[in-house]
Image (cartoon, rainbow, N blue to C red):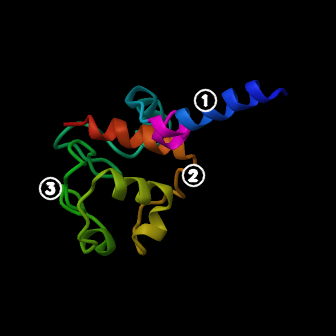
Amino acid sequence: MNGGIARTAIMTLIVLSAIGTADPARAQDPAAGKAVFTSQCAVCHPIQSGRNSVGPSLFGIVGRKTGSVPGFHYSAANSNANIVWDEATLNNYLKAPMTAIPGTTMGYAGLKDDAQRANLVAYLATLK
């Protein structure tokens, strides 16, 4: 590779990194997140307000305190976690729920793919 092409490639990577497109965790595509939700979460969690299932409704989850959906019986761990769900706390929890809140009864091993998790959190933020 000649020097001009190499410099151009390096500059392109620097610019892409600076604007976040080189980092898949920053994808934050709610439409892609909806697909992740449908395949990973919808079997247990409804998105309609006031409707619970195996898991609580996720309607309005961003900005809500853990263990606070009326009519859902939470584990003591979730009830007492005293976390307000935001993008960062959801990202951490969805990566490894049992590590983030030891004693949770959510039987989900976690979503390890950073981009899928970022997209899922972006979708959850739209549920208002």
Q: Label 2, on which residue?
A: 112
- Residue type at mark 1? Thr
Q: Residue at x 33, y 74 (%)?
A: 77
Residue 20, percent from left and from top = 48, 37
- Residue type at mark 2? Lys
**Apparent side of residue 8 relative to residue 128 in the rendered image (left or right):** right
- Residue type at mark 3? Pro
Q: Label 3, on which residue?
A: 70
The question of residue 89 being in magenta is answered with no
Q: Secondary structure at mark 2?
A: loop
63 or 80: which is nearer to us? 63
Cα distance in 3D space between marks 2 and 3: 30 Å
Above or below, 25 relative to 101: above
Above or below, 80 relative to 52: below
The question of residue 24 being in magenta is answered with yes
Numbered marks: total: 3
**Apparent side of residue 108 relative to residue 56 in the rendered image (left or right):** right
- Outermost residue, front direction? 3
62 or 35: which is nearer to us? 62
Tell me the magenta residue range.
17-27
Residue 13, percent from left and from top = 62, 34
